[in-house]
Image (cartoon, rainbow, N blue to C red):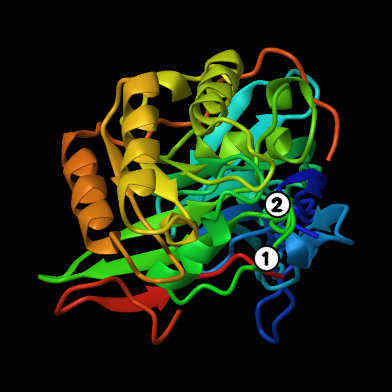
Amino acid sequence: MFLDERLLTVRSGAGGNGIVAWHREKFVPFGGPGGGDGGDGGDVIFVADPELTTFGDMEQLRRVRAPDGERGLGGRRSGRQGEDRILLLPLGTSIYDAATGELLVDLSEPGMRWEAAPGGRGGRGNARFASATDQRPTQAEPGEPGIERNYRLELRLLADVGLVGLPNAGKSTLLARLTAATPKVADYPFTTLEPYLGIVSLPYARRFVLADLPGLIAGAHEGKGLGDRFLRHIERTRVLLHLVDINPVDGTDPAKAYKTLRRELKAYGHGLSGRPEVLAATKLDTLPEGPERERALRRLAKAVDRTVVPISAVAGTGLKELLVAVVSALERAEPAAGPPPRSQPTAGEPPDGGPEGPGCSTTSSSTST
């Protein structure tokens, strides 16, 4: 199961107590105060790890606690500090206050660190209180307590291009053809139950990250179907690649399918409907070459008033032209947007089939768990 939202309680370590002690040494009858300081408690730190793509390793994790610092020692020696607890999170994780829904930090850069709960400071021992007027202090400080905080972690995948389409539009087949990702491919709807990421490598060291998302249906923004939960994962994409089946087996109109997608993106908001897009007519191999194919493509382009790139991921037709269109859209696109602020808390929880043309290679990073 793809885990993209978690509730987590973290608690930092308490600081160790300072102590009251006296310096004992042969031939030093008045050694004075020797109580050491307590060690600081451990911090809880979140770190963005680009190798992680889900919260799968955290499925059973509910609480994270850092060790306490140890009490001070005699001879003015400080107690051992509590070790920091470092929790690796997927790149693209947004941290919200679980109670208020306030966005606290967005882990959008590889290796980015954020202190989720600072450890308590260790108390001072009596050696720290000695002065000219009080050479034998008998006071010491207790350590500060640790801090407990509740967070909601929400993951939005970081991808340059997001594949969107109705169920069975050919998204997974295209991802497998252009990259080395291995999504489930079958001839029935909703084969994609979780997002997949793939890296498309092009000549001259150019590359972009492609995300395959579960198919959308009418009403997805209201919670219908599978796609509504994953719409958040295209919020950060710079370009949308719309896939429309040019010859659906149920005889529906391809233009109607495209308009359904546009309505859902507009209803969801977050600027998705205004994102640069490329429209591809998929499954071109299901229509025979000739007038019938040309008429179908012309009808679609006229009905949606957009340029249509005809492709067949199975036959490898049109993929070079598609990549040219996608790269051109990426060059015009703005940088990916960050996560939206939330004022209220939210409940819950192919290696040998690369693109056409010389110099194209394939690598991938899949989100399968």
Q: Residue at x 31, y 53 (%)?
A: 290
Among the two numbered marks 1 and 2 on one chain, the one whose residue lies closer to the N terminus = 1
Q: Is residue 298 above or below residue 100?
A: below
Q: Which of 267 and 296 lies nearest the eye of the viewer?
A: 296
Q: Residue at x 14, y 79 (%)?
A: 358
In the image, which is nearer the foreground, mark 1 or mark 2?
1
Q: Which of 310 and 191 lies nearest the eye of the viewer?
A: 310
| Residue 334: image tag | none
Q: Residue at x 67, y 68 (%)?
A: 184
Q: Position of residue 163 (x, y in %)?
A: 48, 47
Q: Quadrant of the C terminus?
A: bottom right
Give the residue type at disc 1.
Gln
Label 1 crowd (10 A; few <14 / some 14-19 / many >=20): many
Q: Is residue 142 above or below residue 210?
A: above
Q: Count all numbered tags in the image, as a single digit.
A: 2
Residue 238 seen in this snapshot: no
Q: Which of 330 and 68 lies nearest the eye of the viewer?
A: 330
Q: Residue at x 39, y 80 (%)?
A: 353
Calculate the distance from the C-alpha at mark 1 to the C-alpha at mark 2.
8 Å
Q: Circle 2 — which element?
A: loop
Give the residue type at disc 2.
Gly
Q: Position of residue 279 (x, y in %)?
A: 36, 38
Q: Circle 1 — which element?
A: loop
| Residue 122: image tag | 2
Residue at image mark 1: 81
Q: Is residue 60 above or below residue 153?
A: below
Left or right position of 206 against 166:
left
Q: Is residue 107 above or below residue 110?
A: above
Label 2 crowd (10 A; few <14 / some 14-19 / many >=20): many
Name of the residue lying farthest toward the left? 204
Q: Is there a contact, CB below 8 Å, between mark 1 and mark 2?
A: yes
Q: Position of residue 218 (x, y in %)?
A: 70, 24
